[in-house]
Image (cartoon, rainbow, N blue to C red):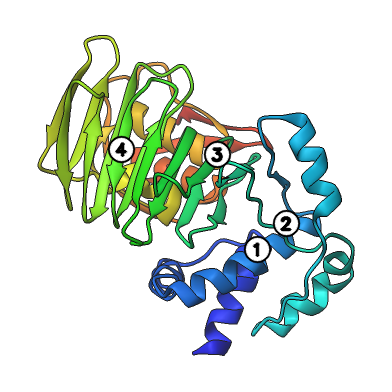
């Protein structure tokens, strides 16, 4: 079991795509707080080695400077020797830090680049960030509150500690939970904030207008009308960026191509007369080549794949 997890973690850290079974095994393994805590240190060492960057800072520059002068590296022992060996030289230089300022508030900030990233928060909650997203985590020891500010999209697996866990977005929409798993989509300038609950239940909406959303349900908050629209169904494609599995049943091909294009980071161009064309199909960790071949075969189209675009055309 440990060898299998080590292989999955190695793939995850090196940005290799996991299979559905591997992702499910990793999610289950991270449910154990001890495992999540262990992985938190592993991923921070890896981040320090140059995979991604993260920062922790306080609101007052003087306090931050004082904190940096007082902080000392500490020794970390890992069950995953292969990671420790790879990052040992970096660990000796930078250490792993936890910040607490004079008001007993912890702050942790993480920004993803042009790739999805998994982050383990200081409370051992696990967050998967979609591309070009960011979170800031703050724990207040006086009020026993965990607060996360999100810009972009993220899948949360919240550890139950007894303390409130609240996610806020730029639209002033909040999601309040104790222990659950949910996906929240809130780009900075979006007019809607979308929620999908995989496990547990959450309160979702604004301070004056919110509703409880439970496992297998979804909801959308309209920022213009300040209203919440709940749904008793869960669109698995809403979290396909995280699972890598897309399943469409008679959906407009224009919507499908837009979603797959975002996932792949590739522009998808359809023939001019395909606006009313629907498609039924299944994609498991798709690549530009596999998407092009599958759709072209089903629609009897020709296609061309470049580094930045998939272009479909009517077959002559």
Estimate the x, y position of residue 230 in percent, counting from the top left. Answer: 14, 33
Estimate the x, y position of residue 174 in percent, counting from the top left. Answer: 32, 32
On the question of residue 9 being in view, the answer is: yes
Quarter-of-image position of residue 47:
bottom right
Circle 2: element type: helix
Q: Nearer the viewer, mark 1 or mark 3?
A: 3
Circles 2, 1 touching at the beta carbon (< 8 Å): yes
**Which of pointers 2 and 4 lies earlier in the amino acid sequence?**
2
Q: Is residue 303 above or below residue 46?
A: above
Q: How many marks?
A: 4
Please tell me the numbered disc located at residue 43.
1
**Which of pointers 1 and 3 lies earlier in the amino acid sequence?**
1
| Residue closest to the eye, 209 or 57 | 57
**Which of pointers 2 and 3 lies earlier in the amino acid sequence?**
2
Pointer 3 residue: 136
Mark 1: few/some/many CA within 10 Å (<14, 14-19, 20+):
many
On the question of residue 316 being in view, the answer is: no
Q: CA distance from mark 4 to mark 3?
A: 15 Å
Q: CA distance from mark 1 to mark 3?
A: 17 Å
Mark 3: few/some/many CA within 10 Å (<14, 14-19, 20+):
some
Mark 2: few/some/many CA within 10 Å (<14, 14-19, 20+):
some
Q: Is residue 246 above or below residue 296?
A: below
Circle 4: element type: strand
Q: Position of 195 compared to 131: left or right? A: left
Estimate the x, y position of residue 246 in percent, counting from the top left. Answer: 35, 49
Estimate the x, y position of residue 42 in percent, counting from the top left. Answer: 66, 69
Please tell me the numbered disc located at residue 175.
4
Pointer 2 residue: 47
Q: Nearer the viewer, mark 4 or mark 1?
A: 4
Farthest residue to the top: give it: 224
């Amino acid at each position: 079991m440990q060898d299998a997890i080590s292989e999955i973690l190695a793939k995850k850290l090196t940005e290799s795509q996991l299979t559905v079974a591997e992702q499910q095994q990793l999610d289950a393994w991270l449910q154990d707080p001890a495992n999540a805590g262990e992985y938190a240190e592993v991923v921070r060492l890896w981040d320090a080695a140059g995979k991604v960057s993260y920062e922790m800072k306080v609101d007052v520059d003087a306090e931050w400077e004082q904190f940096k002068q007082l902080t000392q590296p500490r020794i970390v022992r890992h069950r995953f020797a292969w990671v420790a060996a790879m990052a040992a030289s970096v660990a000796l230089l930078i250490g792993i830090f936890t910040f607490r300022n004079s008001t007993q508030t912890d702050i942790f900030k993480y920004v993803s680049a042009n790739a999805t990233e998994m982050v383990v928060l200081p409370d051992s909650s696990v967050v998967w960030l979609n591309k070009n997203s960011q979170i800031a985590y703050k724990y207040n020891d006086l009020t026993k509150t965990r607060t996360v500010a999100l810009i972009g999209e993220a899948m949360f697996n919240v550890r139950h500690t007894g303390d409130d866990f609240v996610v806020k977005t730029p639209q002033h929409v909040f999601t309040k939970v104790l222990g659950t798993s949910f996906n929240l989509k809130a780009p900075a300038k979006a007019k809607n904030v979308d929620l999908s609950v995989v496990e547990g239940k959450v309160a979702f909406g604004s301070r004056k207008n919110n509703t409880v959303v439970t496992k297998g349900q979804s909801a959308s908050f309209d920022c213009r009308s300040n209203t919440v629209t709940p749904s008793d169904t869960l669109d698995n494609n809403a979290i396909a960026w995280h699972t890598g599995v897309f399943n469409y049943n008679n959906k407009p091909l224009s919507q499908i191509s837009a979603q797959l294009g975002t996932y792949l980071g590739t522009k998808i161009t359809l023939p001019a007369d395909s606006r009313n064309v629907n498609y039924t199909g299944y994609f498991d960790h798709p690549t530009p080549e596999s998407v092009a071949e599958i759709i072209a075969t089903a629609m009897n189209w020709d296609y061309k794949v470049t580094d930045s675009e998939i272009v479909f055309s009517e077959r002559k």
